[in-house]
Image (cartoon, rainbow, N blue to C red):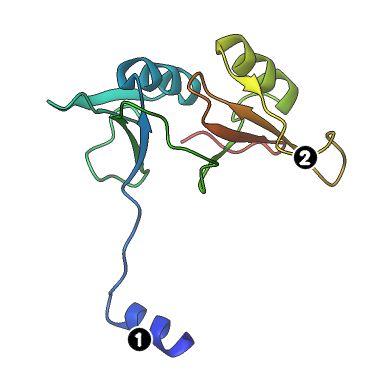
Amino acid sequence: MATVVATALAFGMAARITELVLDCRDPASLAAWWAEVLGYEVLGTEDDGSVEIGPPGQEPKGAVPTIVFGPVSEPTPGKLRLHLDLNATDRDQDAELQRLLSLGATRVDVGQGPLSDTMTWHVLADPEGNEFCLLKSRVDPL
């Protein structure tokens, strides 16, 4: 496997994530919610009702992946196999948790137990029930 990776890198063969796609019942509303959470803006809306958000001023296929909210009539059954992890950029975890809850996020119990020194994240859900985590450490803004 290491040889394959080294060969791919030597010849410039690689891929990168440009968009994350999230199925939802109300793309416009959920895109607006996540844009508020992340400080993103709406980049475009497709004829099928899909809405794309991303960092302000970023060109399409830029350095930071955008998020596309695609319309579906029914939620995906069962637990999603992918979730987003968020880090606050300008406040501590407690203050960011309060901001997210005030925007409509809800706490979710997935069996993680209480917050502790070894488990430093909160599991939350957006208004359509998509789970995400708020991590303890702060990161620099874009």
Front-lying residue, 23 or 6: 23
Task: Kindly state the secondary structure of the residue where label 2 is placed.
Answer: loop
Q: Which amino acid does label 1 sit on?
A: Thr
Foreground label between 2 and 1: 2
Task: Kindly state the secondary structure of the residue where label 1 is placed.
Answer: helix
Name the spot of residue 45 as percent of width and height, x first.
19, 24
Does residue 51 appear left or right of residue 23 in this picture? left
First in sequence, mark 2 or 1: give its number: 1
Disc 1: which residue: 7
Task: Work out how far the residue at label 2 is from the one at label 1, CA to CA, in angstroms.
Answer: 38 Å
Quadrant for residue 22, please give it: top left
Q: Residues within 10 Å of mark 1 (few under 14, many from 20)?
A: few
Image mark for residue 32: none
Above or below residue 102? Residue 31 is below
Disc 2: which residue: 120
Q: Which amino acid does label 2 sit on?
A: Thr
| In the image, farthest residue toward the left | 47
Above or below residue 68? Residue 20 is below
Front-lying residue, 21 or 15: 21
Does residue 78 appear left or right of residue 135 in this picture? left
The residue at 31%/17% (across/down) is 28
Does residue 43 appear left or right of residue 29 in this picture? left
Front-lying residue, 139 or 18: 18
